[in-house]
Image (tube, rainbow, N blue to C red):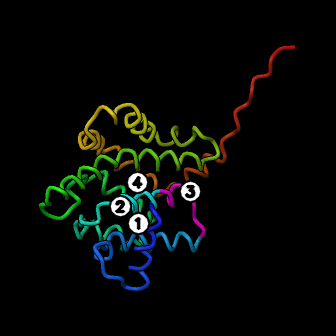
Amino acid sequence: MTFNQRLTIYLCLFLGLNSTLCANELLECLGKEETLLHQKKVQGPIYQLNQNLIGLFSTHSELKVESNILRESCENSNSKLGTSVILLKNMALGRGKIFVGNASTAGSLGKKDIVQAIPGLLFDYFSGLQSLAKDPHCLDQEMPKLLAIKTKIKYLESESNSDVLLSQETANIKSIFTQIENLDKIYEKCSKRPKPTSKSGAN
C-alpha cells in the first residue's frame, strides 16, 4: 500500500474526508482492522494480508462488494478469523460474484484484476502461516489440502485462468479455512513433534 493510499484511508477514518475511497465501506473496514493490528503489535501473515488487500481494493475503489460479504467480513466479533482472512475466504469461494451488480468496462477490468490476484494472495497467506510453525513441514502434514492447493497454485497459476483454478478447488478452500479456525491447536501439535535427528557420518 502506498503512502497516499494509507493517508487517504486514515483521513477517511478519523476526519470524515469525502472521496471515492471513503465511500468504500470495505476499505474503511480493512483500515479499522489495520489500526487494531497496529495497536496489538500484530505482524506476520495476517498483517501482510491486510496490507495487500488494502492496496488491491484501493486501486479498484469503484467496486462494491455484496452487502452479505461486507457484513460477514466486517461484523466478525464471534469469529476466530479476522476481517482480512474472512474476506480472502469469500474472495476465493465467490470470485467475481462477490461484487455488486453490472459494472462499467473499467469496473469489469477491476473485477478481473482482483480475481486474478486471489491465487497469489492465498499462496502468500498460506506460506506465511506455515512459516510460523515450529516445524516448517508440519502444517503441510497436518493440513494436506493446504499443501495440495499451494502446489497447484505454484505450478498452474501462470498457465490457468484464476477463476477456473479457484472453482476447481472450492471444497479444498472451504476445508482449509475451517482448519485455520483451529490453527492454534495445530501449531500446538507441531510444537510437540520431536525434532528430526541428523544422521552423523561414520568416522
Mark nearer the N terminus (1 vs 3): 3
Q: What segment carries the magenta color? A: 41-48
- Residue occupying the point 34% across, 36% down: 157
Three-letter residue code for mark 1: Thr
Q: Quadrant of the C terminus?
A: top right
Which of label 3 and label 4 is nearer to you? 3
Residue at 41% across / 73% down in the picture? Answer: 9
Q: Residues within 10 Å of mark 1 (few under 14, many from 20)?
A: many
Q: Nearer the viewer, residue 199 or 102?
A: 102
**Mark 1 lies on residue:** 83
**Disc 1 to disc 2, C-alpha distance:** 6 Å
The residue at which mark 2 appears reads as: 87
Specify the amino acid type for callout 4: Thr
Q: Are marks 1 and 2 in contact (CB under 8 Å)?
A: yes
The residue at the point 40 percent across, 69 percent down is 30
Give the Cα separation between the discs numbered 3 and 2.
Answer: 17 Å
Q: What is the secondary structure assignment of the residue under circle 2? A: helix
Label 3: which residue? 44
| Real-space Cα separation, disc 1 to disc 4, in angstroms | 15 Å
- How many C-alpha atoms fall within 10 Å of the one at disc 4: few (<14), some, or many (≥20)? few
Outermost top residue: 203
